[in-house]
Image: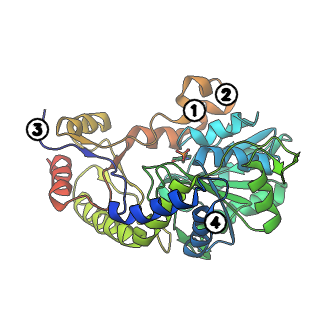
Amino acid sequence: MSNLDPIYVTKPHLPPLEDFIPLLQQIWERRILTNNGPFHQELEDALCKYLGVKHLSLFSNGTIALVTALKALGVSGEVITTPYSFVATAHSLLWNNITPVFVDIDPVTFNLDPSKIEAAITDKTTAILPVHCYGFPCDVDAIQEIADRNGLKVIYDAAHAFGVNCHCGSVLNHGDLSILSFHATKVFNTFEGGAIICHDKDTKQKIDKLKNFGFVGETEVEATGINGKMNELQAAIGLLQLQSIDVAIDQRSVISSTYREQIEKIEGLSCPPPSSALHYNEAYFPILVKPEYRLSRDGLYEKLRQANIYARRYFYPLITDFSMYRHLFSSSPEKLPIANLVASQVICLPIYSTLSTEDLDRVLAILAY
Ligand SMILES: *Cc1c(COP(=O)(O)O)cnc(C)c1O
């Protein structure tokens, strides 16, 4: 075992503590702790501006946002989604009594392969739930075309895609709704938190009603709402994080370039091509460990652990490998060859704004050794 300090796959970004104190004082003075408070409203406005989206509704976390988004659109029956994601993507469907139908991914972007979607559509299909995996944009035009042709809704799990821009501005403007996560491990965090992005005021009103138990005014409840509200502490942290997010992403970008430059020289390791995004958030740094490498993927993973470096095998196992999803017709590995291959080769390397050059060199030394 190495006695060097541990390096984790990410380290949450935090504002200086002294900047948080005046905001805490305001919360204490106002005694407004939650329920669409002033910081909550301010953060919704600030995020709309920063992200380049029209309407955004904050949530207590990304999973409740996903569950609520599906509810808001009345999605039912079957939904086409990816096995190559965090389990919350598929869980949000089960919470709405929807059957997930898993479709294989593209080997370059790791996102749903549009050319395989239509074969999975049945008369029960009502929507597509793609993920912008690692913040790499999905083929949004191809997906929208398929959705339009078949009368389907599109809800993007954009948990990784904070601040990602594609050919026509924010990638979050695609589909009917997009969902963000502000979990501690994400590029932009409010400790726990999330949001739904929508395109019009009426939809935002509906979402805001659903996240507050379904209340309309004080005396009427008209939907099976939930408690998905973000509180004032979370919103205050979010306002501070926003001030330094661009610097943090720039720092991630320097790390990402160094990794890319060094790893391209190592036989058997490959980096995905630079993101097609016009502005990428450097949320993750996945590499593939090919058969030509001198160690297996798990061999490398263990070797890093022995050096006190905790890289993560996102997304291994696939959602379709979990016992509770394995029995589904669409989960069989023969139907998902690319997802299974990528899941067997991937490792996400440590990347965060404060990763030091020394620590980066420690990671690279293990890879190259
Ligand atoms: C983090 C994540 C979620 C869940 O977000 P939480 O805020 O942790 O509930 C959903 N989908 C994906 C792809 C994620 O990475």
Label 4 belongs to which residue? 41
Percent from the top left, x then y, of residue 282? 40, 63
Q: Amino acid at mark 3?
A: Asn
Q: CA distance from mark 2 to mark 4?
A: 42 Å
Label 1 belongs to which residue? 320
**Tags 2 and 1 touching, CB below 8 Å:** yes
Q: Is residue 270 left or right of residue 95?
A: left
- Closer to the chain start, of discs 3 and 4, is 3
Q: CA distance from mark 1 to mark 4?
A: 39 Å
Q: Amino acid at mark 1?
A: Thr
Tell me the mark number nearer the camera, choosing from 2 and 4.
4
Q: Amino acid at mark 4?
A: Gln
In the image, residue 344 above or below residue 267: above
Q: Quadrant of residue 328?
A: top right
Please tell me which residue is depicted at 43% across the width and 43% down the height of the picture.
Answer: 314
Q: Which mark is residue 328?
A: 2
- Closer to the chain start, of discs 2 and 1, is 1
Label 3 belongs to which residue? 3
Tell me the mark number nearer the camera, choosing from 2 and 3.
3
In the image, residue 55 above or below residue 207: below
- Closer to the chain start, of discs 3 and 1, is 3
**Closer-to-camera residue (364/332):** 364
Q: Quadrant of residue 123?
A: top right
Callout 4 environment at 10 Å: few (<14), some (14 to 19), or many (20+)? some
Callout 3 environment at 10 Å: few (<14), some (14 to 19), or many (20+)? few
Callout 2 environment at 10 Å: few (<14), some (14 to 19), or many (20+)? few
- Closer to the chain start, of discs 1 and 4, is 4
Q: Is residue 311 left or right of residue 98?
A: left
Q: Is residue 216 left or right of residue 265?
A: right
Percent from the top left, x then y, of residue 101? 69, 38
Tell me the mark number nearer the camera, choosing from 3 and 4.
4
